[in-house]
Image (cartoon, rainbow, N blue to C red):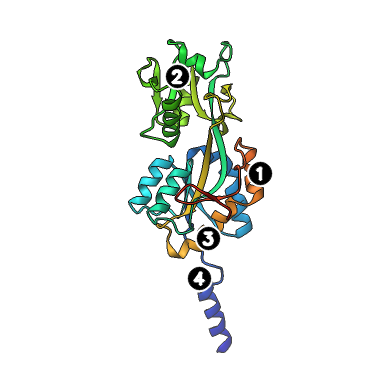
Amino acid sequence: MIRPAVAALVGLVSLLGMGEPVQAEPPTVGAPPSLRAAFDEIVPIFQEEYRAAVSVVYTPSKTLLRQIEQGASIDVFVSAGVEEVEHLHRNKLTLSGAPRIFAQTSLVLVMSADSQATLVSFPDALAARTTRIALGDPEMSYLGEVTARALSKFSPTYKSRSHMLYAPHTEDILHMIRMGKADVGLVYRAIVINHGDVRISDETPFGAELEIQFAQAVVSTCRPSLRSVAEQFSDFLTTPRIVKLLQKYGFEAPSLPMTRSTRSTPTMP
């Protein structure tokens, strides 16, 4: 009588799935589309080594920022600009302290790889009134915002120039160039370094390299049950081997491995 009862109990445990660890809901990482190719390699490495799944949603940083402020279920915020994470930190909406910078890139001027035109500098493109220049929309993306800031210093009257075109995101700019709707465009170097459809026409369009720092933090919308895995993923992104791996995708190591205070003063972690 005992043996059948034991067998029945074992069968019940197996039926209820209690013989294996229960897979918890994975934390959600909000990241900009510019990191998609790199994360396609990085995320599986993390999942294999930590035995923990993560879910990544690719959305422009400005949109992610608004979603977090509205309480969206995002556990780790990865931003294409350190300012967005600093904004959350100033408003006490980060759980892991100041922004953690793990990569950087710069702005470059690109043109179609199929174009027979000679490579041009950005000042020449700006001076040629017929050259159609595609830019990011500052209301839609951080790319547009940082481009607008740089242009305002470089050429304060640029908005009055004809043939200045705006697109919501990087892929839209590249699509305009591929379709012949724009002659050149300003985008992140990391986006196009391995992109066969376009080539870099001007490496330093504003005369000096403009650093765009990618930062991340565990944010206040992180669910308590997922915080441990979220913090592990946040730490993982700042490890030297991941910083090095990102260089394969056109990103550069940050000038210093550092965090940023709300006063923008670098401090070593």
- Residue 229's mark? 3
Q: Which residue type does callout 1 highlight?
A: Lys
Query: Residues under labels 4 and 3: Cα distance?
Result: 28 Å
Q: Earlier in the sequence, mark 2 or mark 1?
A: 2
Mark 4 or 1: the one toward you:
1
Q: Earlier in the sequence, mark 2 or mark 3?
A: 2
Q: Earlier in the sequence, mark 3 or mark 1?
A: 3
Q: Earlier in the sequence, mark 4 or mark 3?
A: 4
Q: Marks 4 and 1: CB-CB under 8 Å?
A: no
Q: SS for tag 3?
A: helix
Q: SS for tag 4?
A: helix
Q: Marks 3 and 1: CB-CB under 8 Å?
A: no
What residue does disc 1 label? Answer: 244
What residue does disc 4 label? Answer: 15
Mark 2 or 4: the one toward you:
2
- Residue 133's mark? 2
Query: Residues under labels 2 and 1: Cα distance?
Result: 33 Å
Q: Is residue 68 above or below residue 156?
A: below
Whether residue 111 appears in this view of the structure is yes
Q: Point out residue 163 in the picture as x, y percentages from the top left corner.
A: 39, 15
Q: Which residue type does callout 2 highlight?
A: Ile
Query: Residues under labels 2 and 3: Cα distance?
Result: 43 Å
Q: Marks 2 and 1: CB-CB under 8 Å?
A: no
Q: Point out residue 62 in the picture as x, y percentages from the top left corner.
A: 40, 41
Q: Which residue type does callout 4 highlight?
A: Leu
Q: Marks 4 and 3: CB-CB under 8 Å?
A: no
Q: How dense is the environment of label 2, judged by Cα within 10 Å: few (below 14), some, or many (20 and up)?
A: many
